Image (cartoon, rainbow, N blue to C red):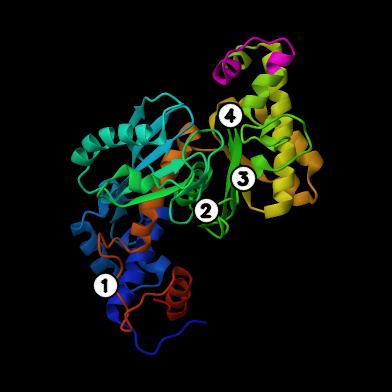
Amino acid sequence: MYRTNKVDHRWLKWINRRALLERLMDTARQSRAELSRALGLTKSTVSALVDEMLAEGLLAEGALLPQTIGRPARGLSLHPDGAVAVGVEIGVENTTVLVVDWTGGIRRRLEVSCRPESPLAVRLQAVRNELGDVFREFSALLGVGVCVPGIVSGDGRLLRAPNVIWPVGSSVSEALHLEEPVRVENDANAAAFGEAFFRRDARDLVFVMLGNGLGGGLVLDGRLRRGAYGATGEFGHTDHGGEIVCSCGRRGCLETEVSLRAALSHYRAIGGRAGHTSELLMLAEQGDPRAHQTLQLLGARLGHLIADLALIYDPESFVVGGAGVEAWALLEDAMRRELAAGAYILPHANLEVRPSRYARLAPSVGAAALMLEPFLVSGGYRGRGPPLAENGTWEDGEKVTRYRIERGG
């Protein structure tokens, strides 16, 4: 157990600010007394922290809470304007720009038009043009998170993007030429992180990005797991033994069987007529029997995939996102039947599998969350990070949490 003999009071203040903000992320509205009990801090300490963060615009004080005993108290919550970031998804076919606050609210949404075959530099220039107005409207933005459909290195360089023709090794953050902080991540990784960050009770989850391609993101113990080179969730390019040539150039990749592109190919093979995956989804909703059959097959293949991933990662839950989630009602039953049949252990047969709360917007929301999370961890210290301990360092979150719990406030 972590201990210290002499602790800088500024460091303890950071720990308690962080704990208070995280508590309000987890629960919609709390009184000072409820925060005091939950965090093991004295009422005077909580009141001092609350007053400070109200003045900083991090918290909002609302209506009186219903109480049966004692003096009525006002509910405290995170102020939506307290932390705001930009999330950008540079997709294969379109680009989405969102302004997202730390309560999960989407404050602004822009769709940036570019031809799919446009070079990365052209796509980024279009994003820069839109961000000018965003920066003027939201002057206190924490930064810009950007996600792309490819493998991204730890320093934000594109290592591989099979569905787009972009130069390998290019730095998206450098090409954006922004003064604001920028973080670049794979789209499925960003989506996975956003689900965990805003849901809060999902400590271990696998995000399955079901679109024209197939990929995923992994969150374990509340932390995004990227792997040594950022390729942890690239199960769409594992070899399943087929003969179809994948967009990456290899033969037999899993996404040639489990993806909307694969579903469209199957639909056409059985006599259906659709020019695009969105048309396939529309026809299925309208009751086209071939389209319905096609999505049932896709759902079954998705269930088989989830059964395999459950055995590999053993998460608490799965989240399905991407364009495919729009057909969730048509995919779910077949998916659950195949998952139950293919589960290796009984708990996996009943795993929680749910659609992403943000549907198509999950990657861009997650990209914003990548910029919001450090601010939350810092205890809301804008621009300068958390205070330092006397030795000039600050401990990682796990040690901080253990220390806070051990000392009992």
Instruction: Evaluate whether residue 302 shows in this view.
Output: yes
Identify the secondary structure beneath mark 2.
loop
The amino acid sitting under disc 3 is Glu
Residue position marked by numbered label 2 in the rendering: 201
The amino acid sitting under disc 2 is Asp
The percent position of residue 163, horizontal first and vertical second, equals: 55, 33
Front position among marks 3 and 2: 3
Q: Nearer the viewer, residue 36 or 395?
A: 395
Residue position marked by numbered label 4 in the rendering: 212
Front position among marks 1 and 4: 4
The percent position of residue 161, horizontal first and vertical second, equals: 53, 39
Magenta range is: 267-281
> Is residue 280 found left or right of 358 in the rendered image?
right
Residue position marked by numbered label 3 in the rendering: 234
The C terminus sits in image quarter: bottom left
Q: Residue at x 34, y 44 (%)?
A: 175
Identify the secondary structure beneath mark 3.
loop
Quarter of the image for residue 361 reads top left
Q: CA distance from mark 1 to mark 3?
A: 50 Å
Front position among marks 2 and 1: 2
Front position among marks 1 and 3: 3
Residue position marked by numbered label 1 in the rendering: 44
| Above or below for 15 versus 113 | below
Mark 4 and mark 2 lie on one chain; the one further toward the N terminus is 2
Mark 3 and mark 2 lie on one chain; the one further toward the N terminus is 2
| Above or below for 6 versus 291 | below
